[in-house]
Amino acid sequence: MIVTSRPALEETLRSRRDAGRKLLVPYVTGGLGRDWVATLEAIGAAGADAVEVGLPFSDPMMDGPIIQQASVAALASGATAHGIISAIGSAEVPIPVAVMTYYNIVARTGHRRMAQLLADAGITGAIVPDLPVDELDGWAEEADEAGVATVLLAAPSTPPERLRMIAARARGFLYAVGLMGVTGERTDLATSAVDIAERCKAVTDLPVLVGIGISTPAQAAEVSRVADGVVVGSAFVHRMLDGSGPDGAAQLVSEFRAALDA
């Protein structure tokens, strides 16, 4: 595995935010199609600030139909977590890369081994949505030691005291969940997306990015009037499933970038 040196997740996002930029973090499903690495590289070159790579899992409870379909397809083609991590290590992506996975994969691999595998591949962030803030013992220490930022999620239903706890322990950025539900494309921006962005911004200086329910450039621009930026998943994975390839992903980055920069 030849690892391309990549910048730290939190440092990069902070510096770009502080320079007045609204942040864009697309999501792709690792192992989906033969050109998924080329798609990852195209996103990295097209104006994204970081990129999130999903490690397919057989029971993706946070994900809606589009990403579920993508995970099933990737697994059926033989994709594995370790193979995807290795491929990321060889990819030419000059921006921070974070993985999104479920705790079953982390636990089976082992906390220290998983953290080191990610670090060795130049992956500087990890999102484990089914590992809550009060159950981080073991993983968080190993991730910190390896230089992998553990991104934590805050939902619209998170009470104030717990939100402060999450914000204090989060690394990389604070992931503000835009609505109660699974991932997927929506026609309208939920009012809860703006509300949770405001609540998160009030308790942390970390970059606050809203994800889940951000489907269009207009929605991204609207919520980013409050938030520091967005995580966009299903819209990108939909293009991967449709066979749009690296060029289609890069074009979508350009569309979101233009709306965020307007």
Image (tube, grey):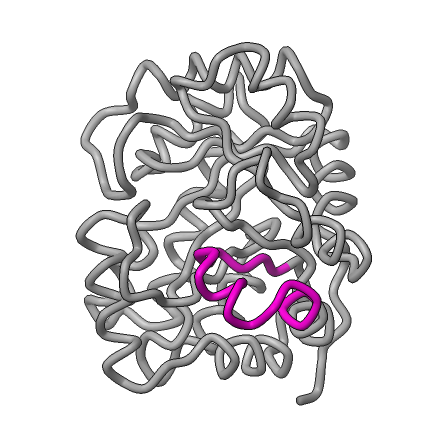
Q: How many marks?
A: 0
261 or 96, nearer to the observer: 96
Is 255 placed left or right of 184 in the picture?
right
- Residue at horizontal 36%, vertical 67%? 56
Q: In which quarter of the image is residue 67?
A: bottom left
**Is the residue 4 above or below the residue 77 in the image?**
above
> Looking at the picture, how far across and down is residue 239, in whole percent?
27, 61
> Looking at the picture, how far across and down is residue 16, in whole percent?
72, 39
- Residue at horizontal 76%, vertical 29%? 18
> Looking at the picture, how far across and down is residue 110, in whole percent?
61, 68
Spot the residue most to the right: 145
**Is the residue 67 above or below the residue 10 in the image?**
below
**Is the residue 200 above or below the residue 125 in the image?**
above
Does residue 41 show up magenta in the picture?
no
- Residue at horizontal 74%, vertical 36%? 14
- Residue at horizontal 59%, vertical 29%? 208
24 or 183, nearer to the observer: 183
**Is the residue 256 above or below the residue 76 in the image?**
above
Spot the residue most to the bottom: 1
67 or 244, nearer to the observer: 67
Q: In which quarter of the image is residue 70?
A: bottom left
Magenta region, residue range: 97-115
Q: Decide whether the magenta segment is chiefly helix, strand or loop.
A: helix
Is 16 placed left or right of 57 in the picture?
right
Does residue 113 show up magenta in the picture?
yes
